[in-house]
Amino acid sequence: MLCYRLTDFHPEMLVLFKLLPVLLFFPLLLVQSLDPAFNDDVLGLIVFKAGLTDPLSRLTSWNEEDDSACNWVGVRCDQDTNRVSELILDGFSLSGHLGRSLIRLQFLRVLQLSRNNFSGSVNPILAQIPSLQVIDLTENSLSGFIPEELFQQCGSLNSISLAKNNLTGSIPPSLSSCSNLERLNFSSNRLSGQLPSGLWSLSSLRLLDLSDNLLEGEIPRGIESLYNLRAINLRRNNFVGWLPENIGNCLLLKSVDFGENYFTGTLPLSMRKLSVCRYLDASRNLLTGEFPDWIGEMRSLEFLDLSVNNFSGRMATTVGNLQSLKQVNLSSNRFVGSLPESFGNCVNLKVLDVGQNLFSGNLPSWVFKLALESVSLSANRYSGTISFPAPLLQSYQSLELLDLSSNALTGGVPSAIGNFSRLQALNISRNSLAGSIPASVGELNTTSVLDMSHNQLSGSIPAEIGGAVSLQELRLESNFLTGAIPADIGNCSSLTSLVLSRNNLSGPVPVAIASLSNLELLDLSFNNLSGSLPKELTNLSHLDTFNASFNHLQGELPVGGFFNTIPLSSVIGNPSLCGSIVKHSCPAVHPKPLVLNPNSSVSNHGPLSPNLRHKRIVLSVSSLVAIGAAVFIAVGVVTVSILNMHARTSMARSAAAFTFSGGDDFSPSHDTEANYGKLVMFSGEVDFVTGAQSLLNKDCELGRGGFGAVYRTELQGGRSIAIKKLNTTSLVKCQEDFEREVKKLGKIRHQNLVALEGYYWTPSLQLLINEYISGGSLHKHLHDRESAGCLTWQQRFKIILGTAKGLAHLHQLNVIHYNMKSTNVLMDFSGEPKVGDFGLARLLPALDRYILSSKIQSALGYMAPEFACQTVKITEKCDVYGFGVLTLEVLTGRRPVEYMEDDVVVLCDMVREALDEGRIEECIDKKLEGKYPMEEAIPVVKLGLICASQVPSNRPDMEEVIRILELIQCPTESQEELE
Ligand SMILES: *[C@@H]1O[C@H](CO)[C@@H](O)[C@H](O)[C@H]1NC(C)=O
Ligand SMILES: *[C@@H]1O[C@H](CO)[C@@H](O)[C@H](O)[C@H]1NC(C)=O
Ligand SMILES: *[C@@H]1O[C@H](CO)[C@@H](O)[C@H](O)[C@H]1NC(C)=O
């Protein structure tokens, strides 16, 4: 007996032996063998469990030492026999196969394993459990065919569900032998092929659900053998042919679903006998014919869906007999005429969808008298006006969806629309509605979708719209709306789509839109909106579609956020917009009046009052403006307006801040400086007086360098300033860093340094305002034919020493010049040199060697060799190198690099060679011939060469240079040092 069992159990016994302590198990088996039936249930279930994964440990009560399985979770026994009769493990999260061990449960009647993860095929062994009445394997991962053997002896099978698995193949014909089958559910698999004809003779069948498969073929005309049928669901298959003509003989049918197949023909006349039928769905087929008159006889009908077919003709008035009707969907057919008034008798109606038909006439007034929840009459031919017939309508309390879109409705939007207290979606788009949007839309505080687009609505968008606080989608496009977009729209904080395109809206884009933080779609295109786009829009982190094209927007496009990636098409058609996206660089400064920002200057006076005006120190900074605009000036002269500027009266602070105002008058600007340029003069007290017109022409350009062009401009009062327009825009740091660095540089004052007096900042234009030095550059004095009045030795020495002092001062303050060269040394009227353009590299985001060397390219010959060497740190010694070259330049009057016919002469090499060969005099500027002390000249040449050493550490620091120069001037024993 035991031996027989072991072999019989073959595969699972192996698992069993792994699982159970053999010594424990065998005595049990021997003892129990006296009662073989009892033994079989425990054994069968333990082996079944052994093949499963039980991640939630739901089967821990299943203990092989127990005498009986009757108290185990999910197990029920027959009271008389004490044998397991039901195994109910629905939703236990078990996975594994349906093993052979279940065959041991010979008295099992109910096997319910739904909502687990059983996989593999449906084991035909189940057919060998003679008493099995219920098999429920719904919602598992079973695959493969349904085995033919499963139904070979299924006399007792009452209910089988294999729904929601991955079963394939066809339904086995053996199914027809299950003569007691009442419930058959194979829905939601991938079953295919034709239905076995025997299916239609299963006269016990109450429920037949084969929906959501790939089944095909025709349904026999007569299915009257299924006289017990309560529900038939063949939805979503590939069935063809006519609906079963005798279906009406299945008198007990309550639910009929033939939807989403390819059925043709009409609704079978016999259906009129289905007087207990509540649910009829024949939607999405190819059905034709008229709406049946007899429908009124299906008195129990609650749900009727004939949508998406080819039904035509008029609606039968008998529909009014369907007092239980709750939902009707007749959409997408070709029904004509009007909805019968008798519909008004269907007092239980909640949902009515007759969209996409050819219904015409006035809107049916009964619709609003019923307590409907959802009404769609869209895409028909309804005409006339929208009117709500009575002051107190049932639907005011009930209607959640009203779709009247795509009809030919005229007249206005009734103000009573605000009475629908539960409305969630209102679509009246694509009609011919005129007049203005009633303020009562603000009462629609439950509404999430409001679509009034594609009408002829005029007037402005009422500010009350802000009351519709639940709005997620607001579409008003393609109307004739005028006026400004109300800022109250910012109250609709749930908005995800806001479409206002193709109207005549004007005024600015309200900043409030930027507070709609859920916004995903914003379309403002084709209006007359003006002003600039609020930069706060960049905060809209969910925005993925933005369109402001074809308006009159102007100014700079916001930078950052989604604006970094919007396509040109989003902003095209706004000629005055600028920014990189529209490929139209922003004129950083418009030739407009400049007014002091009152907030930062006259805090104790408030905005400028008229009596304060005369006290204003007026400054024409027109030239600044003109320089800013110079990029756009074609050629020649431009007259610029006089600019008003109010100097900071408070001397406590060192900087005076000014902002450009958008207005044409001289009124103080309240705009934030971020929108405009910012001008800061470090001196605080501005000594520019009296206004006069100023001209800027290209002659004012003093020169160009690696960092930008320099212009000279005259201020009222005759004082000149030099303005450097940085051409490194794209490289300049952010405003904050820029200002910090510039302010640092502005604090540096030394008689041999050009003072930085102020700056002007916009994101796209930066100007540095420098002290103007009248004498021109050292370069000009040395090399310009016309101006090269000969510099004397004393003058040259003074230049070298002064330059050294200027540089030493910078180095003391840890500022590296980076760009030493003769064009950056300016001469004042007394012949004192002043080093300018220092520290500009600090304004770049990083001391990038590549950028540095490309900016300093023009300084060929001055550039220290370490710039070319990635591994050597750039220190102030690079300035010492430049100084060395400059010293040699001053002494020789020759350029650091000179291009001869077929030769390049590098000054340092030439001088070094001459020194080595003892013919240094040949190098000294010919203009000095006989007019200089050799005992001074030679050590200065040597100093210059040492400073221009290849190795940075061989170069002296500037303090030492000064000491040496001073010693050379008053010769002592120091000379030996240099020999
Ligand atoms: C079901 O079981 C299969 C393997 O049989 C596994 O791949 C899948 O992840 C399981 N699903 C769940 C929901 O546990
Ligand atoms: C309103 O109805 C029209 C067509 O009838 C449709 O295209 C549009 O998407 C609907 N509006 C909303 C917001 O769903
Ligand atoms: C919008 O919100 C503001 C501030 O809460 C409120 O003053 C205003 O009345 C609201 N607008 C509307 C139309 O509800």
Image: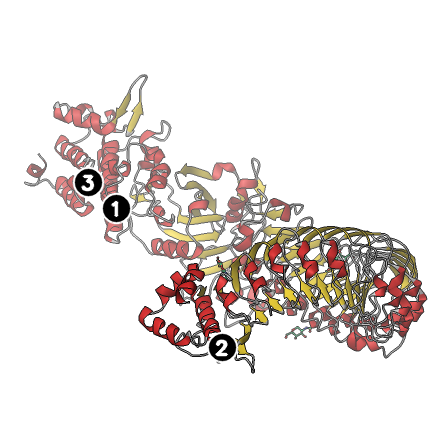
Any part of residue 210 in sight: no
Give the residue pinned by disc 1: 807
Q: Secondary structure under badge 3?
A: helix
Q: Is mark 1 within 8 Å of ligand 3?
A: no
Q: Residue at x 42, y 46 (%)?
A: 731
Q: Three-letter amino acid code at disc 2?
A: Val
What is the C-alpha distance between the residues marked 1 and 3?
16 Å
- Amino acid residing under circle 3: Pro
Instruction: Name the mark nearer the viewer: 3 or 2.
Output: 2
* Amino acid under disc 1: Leu
N-terminal of the two: label 3 or label 2? 2
The residue that label 2 is drawn on is 73
Disc 3 marks which residue? 952
Q: Residue furthest top?
A: 902
Mark 1 vs mark 2, CA separation in Å:
92 Å
Q: Residue at x 56, y 59 (%)?
A: 124
